[in-house]
Image: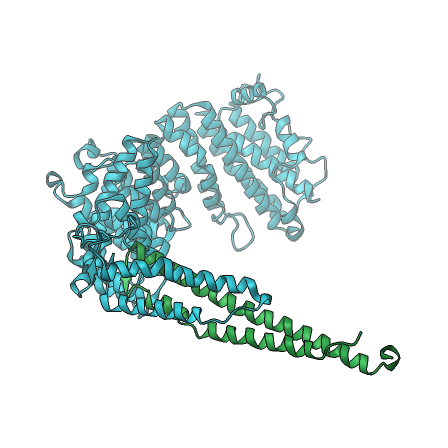
Amino acid sequence: MPLAPDEAAELRHRARALRLVAAQLGACTVNDLPIRGGADTWIGPTPQLCLDDLTSLRRRLRQAQDDFVSAAVGLERRADVVDAAARAAALSPGILS
Amino acid sequence: MGYDRDRLAALRAAMHRSVDELDRISPIDPAATSAARSVSTIRTTLRDRWLPVIDSILGCVALDGRSPVHLDSSDLRNAWLLEMQTLGWQVLADPIDLAEPFDPSDVTVGAVAALGSALAEGDLERLLDTPDELAWLTRVLRSVADDAVLLSTFRTAIGGDATWAAVLDHLGRARAAADQQTEWHPHDFARRDHLRSVDDAIGAVVEIYAAGPHGGHRAWVPTVVQLVEPYTAALLLQHLQMYRPLNATTLALICHQLLLRWFDAPIDANPWVDQYWGGDNTADVLFPLLSAQPAAAAAFLRRVAERPELVLVSAQHDRLVENLLLVGTSPENMNPDDAGRVLRSMIGYIRLPEANIRLARDGVTTSAHAILGSVIAPWLMQFGARADEWAWNADDGDEVLRWVLADADGAARLADATKQWQRRATTWQLIGDDGRIDDRALNDVATMFEQIDRAFRDAQIAAAAETLFWTNTAFWLAQTLASSLVEATPAAPIASSAISMVSTRVRSALEDQHVLASAAAVRADARATYHSRLMDTAVIAVIACVGTLIDNGMLPADALEPLDLTAGSAGSTRCTAEETGRRLRLFVASLEPDLDPLTYESLLLVTDVFAGPLVSRLLCE
C-alpha cells in the first residue's frame, strides 16, 4: 500500500501547535503569582495557604509545559519515521510494482 | 490576617490575567491530554478558589463576616502584623483559624525585624508567657540562624547586650521554674517537654547571640554574662559550647567570676533565681562544662584555690564536685605545685568545723572523705616521701591521709582509684640516666607503700578494699620494676614487647609462695602468714622481676626453684617479715653468677628497698 505523504506533514503541524502552547504557558502570568502573593502583599494562615498553592500551581504549569514539548517531540519522531518509510519505498520499485 | 490593599488588588488582577491567558489556550491535541488537564486545573483553582477569597477581602468584607480584628499585642506571634498595621496594612479575621499567623520557617526580613523590635521594646513577661510562644520563637530563630540577611536584621533589631540580657534572663527564670516542676513531678512528661522547650528556646537565642562578629586578634567574650543572673549566664555558657566554644582560659575566667558574684551576694537578699527554685543551680550547670574541658577545669581550680568554698559549698551534687576536682587536679592537667595549693586548700576547708553550714549558698558537699579518697589517689607520694612538693611536711600529709582513710568510703574510694594512681606513677622516673634504678625514687615508692600500709591497718578498714588496693598497686609496681630491669639491659628491644607481668611462670611462682591467691582460703592463709602488704609487695616484685628475666632468656628456666618462703616460717622464732626479707636477699644473691652486674645490682636494690633490714626492723618492731 502506498504511504500517504501528507501524514508526516500533519504530524509536524500538530507538533508545532503543541510547541506553541508550551511557549504560551512559559509566558503565562501564573509564573509571577507566587512573587506577587508573598509576604509583601499579605500575611496570615490564608495568605500562606494561597502562597503555597500558587507555588504549587506554578510547578504544575511548568510540568505541563514540559509535557507539551515532549508530546511535540513524539509527533516529530513519528513524522520522521513516516518520511523514512516513504523514502525506502521509493528506492524499492519491486515492492511498489 | 494582614494585607496591603494595593498589592492585594494587584495580585487579584494578575490572577484574572492568568485565567484569561489560560482560557486562550487553543483546543489541545489528543497527544497531550494529561498536560491539558493540568492547565485546566490551574485555571479552575485560580478562578474558583482564590479569586473569590481575594474578592471577598477587597470588596465584600462585611458580607463575608470578615471584620477588622484587634490584634493581641501580648502575643509575640502578632509582632509582625502589628508592625505592618502601623504601616497602613488592613487586618482582618482569618477564615483559617491557626494558632500561628505565619509559618515560622518562612520568615521574611520584615517579620524578623518586627520580632526583634518586639523583644527589645515589649514586655517579655507578656510576650513570652506561653509554651506555644516559646516553641514558635524557637522555630523562627532557627530559621533566622540559617540565613545571613535575616540574622543580621534580627541582631540589628535586638540592639545591644541589654536586650539579649533581658531575653536570656526571662528564659533563665522560666527554665529554673520548669526544672523545679520536673523535680517535683519526675514522671510528668508534659512538664519534661516544657523544660525541653525552654532549653530549646535558650539554645536558639544563644545561637543567634553567638553568631555575632567574629575575627579580630582578641578572643570573643560573651559580654552579656556580666548583665544576667549567674544561673542564666551558666545556661548561656552551656549552650555556647555547642555553637561557639570558649577557650579554656576564657571559660575558667568567666566561671570564676560568675561563681564569685553568685556566692558573694548578700545571702539574705535572696538575689538569685536558682536559690529559691529546686532544680540545678549555677554551680551544677558550670561544673560539668569545666570538667568536659580539662584545661579549663585546671585553670578554674587554680583560680579558686584561695576560695575553696566556691567548689565545696556550691554544687548540689557531690559527683559534680568530685569530677571537677578529679579532672582539674589530674597530673596530666596540673603540676604538683598547683595541685598541692588547690587540694591542700580544699582539704583545709573541708576540715574546718561547721564550715559547710556557715558558708553554704545552695549546695553542700556531703561526702568529702569519699571525694578526697578519689582525688588524692594520683598524689599519694606528696602525702609522705615527696611532701615537700606540696609545701607541707610528711607528718601533715600522713595525718590527712589517715583522716581520709579513717572513713570507710574514703578508704574504699582510694582503693578504687588505684588506676589513676598507676597512671600517675608511670611518669615517675625509676631508671636514672646511667641505666641504673634510681634508689631515691624507689625509696620514695617504698616509703609511700609503707605509709599507706600503716594507715590502712590503723584505720581497720574492710579487708576487701585493702586487698584490692594492695593487689593492684603491688602488681603495678612489680610490672614497672620488671620492665625497668629488662629495658635497662641490652635485651631491651626484644624484651619490652614480651613482658607480661602475669606470665604463667610468674603467676605459678606467686601462688607457690602464697602471695597470689588461687583460692579464698589460700588468700586468708597468706594474709595470716605475712604481717605486711609491704612484704607481699617485695615478694611480688622480686618474683616478677626474676620471672621476666627468665622469660627473656636472661636467667635459666629453673632460676625460681630455690626460692621457698613458706617452709618453716610457722615455727620460726624470727619475725615473719624479717625472715622473708632474709630469704629474698639470699635468693637474689644466689642469682649473681647468672646475671650481668647492672641487672643484678638493680634486682638487689629492689629487694633491699622493699625487704631490706630497715624494712624488717620497721615491720618487726
Where is residue B525, by image quadrant?
top right
Q: Quadrant of the C terminus of chain B?
A: top left
Q: Does residue B252 appear anywhere in the picture?
A: yes
Q: Residue at x 59, y 45 (%)?
A: B483
Percent across and percent down for residue B87 are 18, 66
Q: Residue at x 28, y 56 (%)?
A: A44
Q: Of B349 and B610, which appears nearest the observer?
A: B349
Q: Residue at x 65, y 53 (%)?
A: B493
Q: Of B277 and A64, which appears nearest the observer?
A: A64
Q: Is residue A11 left or right of residue B269?
A: right
Percent across and percent down for residue B266 are 12, 42
**Chain letter, cyan:** B
In the picture as drawn, the residue positioned furthest to the top comes out as B571
Percent across and percent down for residue B465 are 45, 27
Q: Does residue B161 appear anywhere in the picture?
A: no
Q: Is residue A5 above or below residue B444?
A: below
Q: Of A24 and B202, which appears nearest the observer?
A: A24
Q: Quadrant of the N terminus of chain B?
A: bottom left
Q: Check the image and tell me how it is coloured.
A: by chain
Percent across and percent down for residue B421 are 45, 41
Q: Of B388 and B203, which appears nearest the observer?
A: B203
Q: Is residue A76 left or right of residue B251?
A: right
The number of discs equals 0
Q: Is residue B345 left or right of residue A57?
A: left
In the picture as drawn, the residue positioned furthest to the right comes out as A94
Q: Is residue B62 above or below residue B552?
A: below
Q: Is residue B4 above or below residue B204?
A: below
Q: Give the colour chain A carries in the figure.
A: green
Where is residue B450, by image quadrant?
top left
